[in-house]
Image (tube, rainbow, N blue to C red):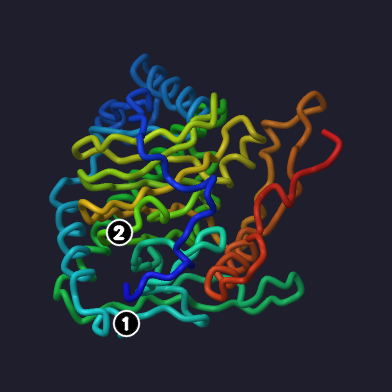
Amino acid sequence: MGNIDESFFQETEHRPKQSTIEAESIPLIDLSPILTSDSLSSSSEITNLVAQIGDACQKWGFFQVINHGVPSMCREKIERASKEFFLLPTEEKRKVSRDEDNPLGFYDTEHTKNVRDWKEVFDFVVENPTLLPDSHEPHDMELMELKNQWPNFPANFREACEEYARGIEKLSYKLVELIALSLGLSSKRLNSYFKDQTSFMRLNYYPLCPIHHLALGVGRHKDSGALTVLAQDDVGGLEVKRKTDGEWIQVKPTPDAYIINVGDIIQVWSNDRYESVEHRVIASSMKERFSVPFFFNPSHYVMVEPLEELTNEESPAKYRAYNWGEFRTTRNLSNFKKLNVENVQIYHFRNGDL
């Protein structure tokens, strides 16, 4: 990563603590009841599972799942391909660098809240190409095509990525259906929003960090999409801000589990019944770390707003509708240019006087 500069330094209050708390209480949920059926028809097992999902979304905004149906071989292939890619020489990785015109590919100067993260990333979309607004301006109707760019090495990189993405996509639909049921909706209520999805996958690499007491792998943030499905290795490092007291809690790795968190879109759809929670990644001077998050996002033309079924006179809509594609394009532009202003957030669309 070259010479260390102060762009990595977190403000004092956001630097990692030297002692951490492991989040034994983040729910671990067994999804085996959904593996035996394509439909989430009512049964005591499904009812119990839906209740667990709802409780986890409400209390934590995070949970882990096991017996999820994603083949372990599929995960092993992408983890191996990811390691092989990131351990290539930097000049080789930069042959597929992202830029202002294409936010997909390799990047090693990612910023979160205007502080540089101690990591390298590789991004690709699930639907290739993916359509997004060319501009965040409401009157600009032009669309741009986001197209994946793949490295020449390792040889099986693209195959491993695409195979894994389809497996996680299938799991994501199941999770969204369970979340819909937990909100008292029909299981398929949210599915149509993902018809022309803008979902993307990210490969993360966190090199050894000699200034782990000053920097973070990823600074504190919330996920702007609908749902995130994360595979992390056995090194760990993910921390979640506990809702009850604001403490940073370390999520202990569970073999073959996925970490799930609800994003801002589900917070808005649920009219704040579920909350998108801040999280971050600690840097390590002892072990490098790899992770693979899948960001399940709706189509660019979706207007995100509280669902009609979850609002009434006693509980009016807490947010104005916003266009997801314009929101995403604004975030992409701000992230690339590293603008010295706060990124667009869902609270910018919060209704007043509630």
Residue 217: give x, y in percent of width and height: 38, 55
Q: Residue furthest right?
A: 353
Residue drawn at x 42%, y 78% is 98
Q: Secondary structure at mark 2?
A: loop
- The image shows residue 83, relative to residue 95, as above or below, that is above
- The image shows residue 110, relative to residue 214, as above or below, that is below
In front of the other: 39 or 174: 174
Tell me, for residue 128, which label it has, or none.
none
Total count of labels: 2
Tell me, for residue 209, which label it has, or none.
2
- The image shows residue 240, relative to residue 326, as above or below, that is above
Residue drawn at x 62%, y 58% is 324
Tell me, for residue 94, which label it has, or none.
1
Residue drawn at x 68%, y 40% is 306
**Which of the image's four quarters has the N terminus?**
bottom left
Q: Is residue 110 left or right of residue 156?
A: right
Tell me which corner region of the image, top left, top right, bottom left or bottom right, holds residue 44.
top left
In front of the other: 354 or 19: 19
Dot 2 crowding, Cα within 10 Å, few <14, some 14–19, many 20+: many
Tell me which corner region of the image, top left, top right, bottom left or bottom right, holds residue 158.
bottom left
Tell me which corner region of the image, top left, top right, bottom left or bottom right, holds residue 155.
bottom left
In front of the other: 231 or 315: 231
Given the image, on which type of amino acid does mark 2 rest?
Cys
Residue drawn at x 38%, y 73% is 107
Dot 2 or dot 1: first in sequence order is 1
- The image shows residue 117, relative to residue 90, as above or below, that is above
